[in-house]
């Protein structure tokens, strides 16, 4: 018998009445040495449960390889820490998670096959999912409530009613969880819409809703869908995420707290989305594609109760007061904001030009036409495409099929322009100085779409390229390695402007490590690493103006900062500050 069971209007945990008051906390968006701190702060706000997705693509980057459960992916350790803090866990293993995460959590090696019907009973899809569950569940079973662990419920798929209506597929997943030893309560979650709930739920499986307002109406929709059983908002949206070039979204704390009070006063259970958002470290951000492609920023602060750096914000205090009206809250002090690194300038005085490094760093694949990134085995990051242009003069470069997602064009090493998927750009006027000039196209995957029919869209150059209607053939296609070059690749450069894409290196001293925020005034677009840890992307397009630097990334003494600047840097320096800048607010 599962530890968590349902009654006509609520939950029982080990036979006793229990209301789930949960908050989302994604282990893979938080440095693992900060997990215990974030979990403690969840309990102190009054939460009795935390929720997390499981990103399939992050855990299984290779279809034939083992599951990665190390470091930031050590899910068993995260579950153990949650249990030690006295928290229960809602586990959402996918296979699809959305979550503003690269590809919605579906692996690029799977979505590259455009013939597979994703999130369906297609045997090719379910076979891959079955192998994933075969790998994932055995190390997690000791952490389920049946074995004395904290996991009290497991989700079947994710907001499936917004995508499809393949009930046999959902049943396959539910039966697969049971067959692999999951005894705990199963649940689905869908937007509080009658059609979504009808398409995304299963008989015998708890149906929950996702919404951020209109509390009475949304709970009424849930009750109309299921005449009895617990009412639960599995994602109570208390903030929102940001796209590059858009505003920074915030929600008034008093407004969100009032809606939370309405939810709890109605007797419902709740999972705050998010309690603590964290960061899309490295190249893990997703993207949306409604009318146009729109990549998500590096910060996943989400205007959550616990800020990106783990400090209690206005919602933390407001929500704690609301929860205390409906459930016990620990009689312990509210945590204070953590220490921050003093303002620290960093001179970046060594450089490694990107294009020569890319050519020297690995073998090329060759094609008559350009090869898409998945054909190069490149799931994220950058690819360099090179050919020659036979004719000189002014003309129009045409990229048949467009680019995925942003292409920088160089002729004989000189910048010639940029094309962007989100603007639908496929042509670029260029001047070719001589017959046989070298054409380089550096393409960046800005993040896989995580919601809707564009999941799995290809990246790189997506068709033939022509100059003045003459198709260019004979392409060298190189995936760029992730991470930073070795020290031998850098040469002294001073701190003056750089006109071409390059890695830039500098050092700075730290007396006592503490959280910091990397500000990059004068830089345009690229990626940043501190001591080899990938902080994520920066872009002067905003809204985000700083990158979070977790304290565990720093060390006493000398520390390294590397930027991959894709355009010309004019500053030659960076600044570690004690406060974030996520951009102008949009309430």
Image (cartoon, grey):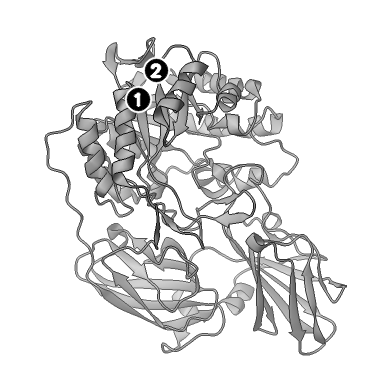
Give the left or right position of residue 214, taking residue 104 as reference. Answer: left
Instruction: Please give the name of the residue rendered at 66% of the width and 77% of the height, measured from the top-left corner.
Output: 417
Question: Eyeballing the image, is 311 above or below 402?
Answer: above
Q: Position of residue 492 (x, y in %)?
A: 44, 87
Q: Quadrant of residue 504?
A: bottom left
Q: Position of residue 515 (x, y in %)?
A: 27, 61
Q: Position of residue 232 (x, y in %)?
A: 40, 24
Neighbor class of circle 1 (other Cα within 10 Å; few <14, some 14-19, many 20+) is many
Residues tagged 2 and 1 counted as in contact (Cβ below 8 A)? yes
Q: Identify the mark at residue 230; answer none if there is no mark.
A: 2
Q: Secondary structure at mark 2?
A: loop
Which residue is under mark 1?
269
Question: Eyeballing the image, is 360 above or below 213?
Answer: below
Instruction: Please give the name of the residue rendered at 43% of the width and 83% of the height, measured from the top-left corner.
Output: 350
Q: Position of residue 119 (x, y in %)?
A: 63, 33
Dot 2 or dot 1, earlier in sequence: 2
**Quarter the N terminus occupies:** top left
């Amino acid at each position: 018998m599962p530890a968590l069971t349902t009654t006509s209007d609520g939950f029982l945990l080990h036979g006793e009445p229990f209301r789930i008051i949960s908050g989302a906390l994604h282990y893979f968006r938080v440095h693992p040495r900060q997990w215990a701190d974030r979990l403690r702060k969840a309990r102190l706000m009054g939460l009795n449960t935390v929720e997390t997705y499981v990103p399939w693509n992050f855990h299984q980057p290779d279809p034939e390889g083992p599951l990665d459960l190390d470091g930031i992916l050590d899910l068993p350790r995260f579950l153990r820490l949650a249990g030690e803090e006295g928290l229960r866990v809602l586990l959402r293993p996918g296979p699809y998670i959305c979550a503003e995460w690269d590809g919605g959590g579906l692996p690029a090696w799977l979505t590259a096959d455009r013939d597979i019907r994703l999130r369906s009973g297609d045997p090719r899809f379910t076979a891959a999912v079955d192998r994933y569950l075969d790998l994932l569940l055995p190390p997690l079973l000791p952490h389920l409530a049946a074995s004395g662990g904290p996991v009290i419920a497991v989700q079947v798929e994710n907001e499936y009613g917004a995508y499809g209506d393949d009930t046999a597929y959902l049943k396959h997943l539910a039966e697969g969880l049971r067959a692999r030893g999951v005894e705990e309560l199963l649940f689905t979650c869908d937007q509080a819409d009658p059609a979504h709930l009808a398409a995304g739920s299963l008989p015998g499986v708890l149906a929950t809703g996702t919404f951020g307002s209109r509390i009475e109406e949304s709970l009424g929709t849930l009750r109309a869908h299921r005449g009895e059983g617990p009412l639960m908002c599995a994602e109570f949206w208390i903030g929102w995420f940001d796209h590059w070039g858009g505003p920074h979204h915030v929600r008034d704390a008093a407004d969100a707290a009032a809606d939370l009070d309405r939810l709890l006063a109605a007797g419902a259970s709740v999972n705050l989305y998010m309690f603590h958002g964290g960061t899309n470290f490295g190249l893990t951000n997703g993207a949306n594609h409604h009318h146009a492609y729109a990549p998500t920023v590096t910060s996943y602060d989400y205007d959550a109760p616990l800020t990106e750096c783990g400090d209690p914000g206005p919602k933390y205090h407001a929500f704690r007061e609301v929860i205390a009206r409906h459930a016990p809250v620990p009689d312990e002090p509210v945590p204070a904001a953590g220490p921050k690194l003093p303002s620290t300038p960093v001179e970046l005085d060594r450089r490694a030009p990107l294009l020569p490094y890319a050519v020297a760093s690995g073998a090329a694949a060759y094609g008559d036409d350009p090869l898409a990134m998945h054909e190069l085995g490149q799931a994220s990051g950058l690819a360099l495409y090179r050919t020659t242009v036979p004719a000189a003069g002014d003309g129009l470069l045409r990229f048949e099929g467009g680019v995925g997602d942003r292409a920088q064009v160089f002729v004989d090493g000189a910048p010639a322009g940029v094309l962007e998927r989100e603007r639908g750009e496929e042509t670029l006027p260029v001047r070719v100085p001589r017959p046989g000039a070298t054409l380089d196209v550096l393409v960046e995957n800005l993040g896989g779409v995580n919601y809707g029919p564009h999941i799995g869209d290809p990246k790189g150059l997506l068709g033939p390229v022509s100059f003045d209607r003459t198709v260019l053939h004979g392409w060298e296609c190189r995936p760029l390695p992730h991470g930073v070059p070795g020290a031998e690749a850098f040469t002294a450069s001073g701190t003056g402007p750089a006109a071409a894409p390059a890695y830039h290196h500098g050092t700075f001293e730290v007396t006592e490590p503490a959280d910091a925020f990397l500000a990059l005034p004068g830089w345009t677009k690229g990626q940043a690493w501190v001591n080899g840890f990938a902080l994520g992307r920066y872009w002067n397009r905003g809204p985000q103006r700083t990158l979070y630097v977790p304290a565990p990334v720093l060390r006493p003494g000398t520390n390294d900062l590397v930027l991959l600047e894709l355009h010309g840097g004019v500053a030659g320096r960076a600044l570690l500050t004690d406060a974030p800048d996520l951009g102008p607010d949009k309430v």
